Image (spheres, helix red, strand yellow):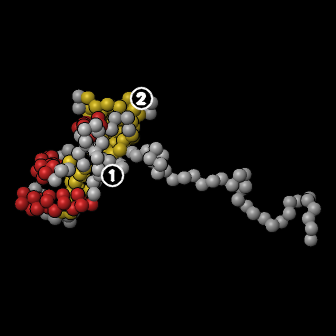
Amino acid sequence: MSEKTSEIVQLLAPTVESLGLELLGVEYLPAPGGATLRLYIDVPAAEGGEPERTVTIDDCESVSREVSAQLDVADPISGNYTLEVSSPGMDRPLFTAAHFARFAGQQAKVGLKLPQEGRRRLQGTILRVENGQVAFALDGAEFVVELDNIDKARLVPDWEALGLAPGKKPGKGGNSGKHSNKPAAGKPHAE
């Protein structure tokens, strides 16, 4: 996490929490002509794991309104920027060690800041988090990454398990797809 991102998280997390939500993380994407500041919010997990409800559009609007006013006063970003407030979605971003630990056993797609063993990107199953490192099952082996070397990470939804995978089109049973009105050679036909 960059210094600017850390500063923004520390500034905005209490405001988001005061609305009964959790600030999962922040993406600050500087660009010529105007940056993007994207906040990911969620409903805090209830005792026993999963949240009792999901983030609504009203939640995003409330956070956007409150945070926008706070950003105007604190002014941590010089120049123009666009504020986006989003729920984590099915391909939820992972920002902290606690996020990786919570989703151990699930697939994640990860981009690294610095190459490791010739890789800048990887996709594997999260095994565990310990001592500032995340272990992934990757190509039949364990691949350990320093949490500080992870640039971006997202869960990879199991669309089949969720019942959302696209269905396979039924086959045509040996038909090559070519149609002809001509009779097969050597077979009698009526005229």
Vertical position of residue 161 compared to residue 68: above or below? above
- Residue 149 placed where, x, y %? 26, 38
- Residue 30 placed where, x, y %? 21, 57
Secondary element type, mark 1: loop
Task: Quarter of the image for the C terminus: give it.
Answer: bottom right
Q: Residue at x 35, y 31 (%)?
A: 127
- Residue 1 placed where, x, y %? 20, 44
Residue that label 1 marks: 89
Secondary element type, mark 2: strand
Quadrant of residue 63 within the rendered picture: bottom left
Quadrant of residue 44 within the rendered picture: top left
Residue 175: mark in rendering = none
Callout 2: few (<14), some (14-19), or many (20+) C-alpha neighbours within 10 Å?
A: few
Q: Is residue 44 visible?
A: yes
Pointers 2 and 1 in contact (CB under 8 A)?
no
Between residues 151 and 48, which one lies in front from this camera angle? 48
Indicate the amino acid at tag 1. Answer: Gly
- Residue 23 placed where, x, y %? 20, 49
Q: Residue at x 25, y 43 (%)?
A: 45
- Left or right placement of residue 12 versus residue 105 in this view: left
C-alpha distance separating marks 2 and 1:
29 Å
Residue that label 2 marks: 141
Q: Residue at x 44, y 33 (%)?
A: 139
Indicate the amino acid at tag 2. Answer: Ala
Q: Residue at x 65, y 53 (%)?
A: 171
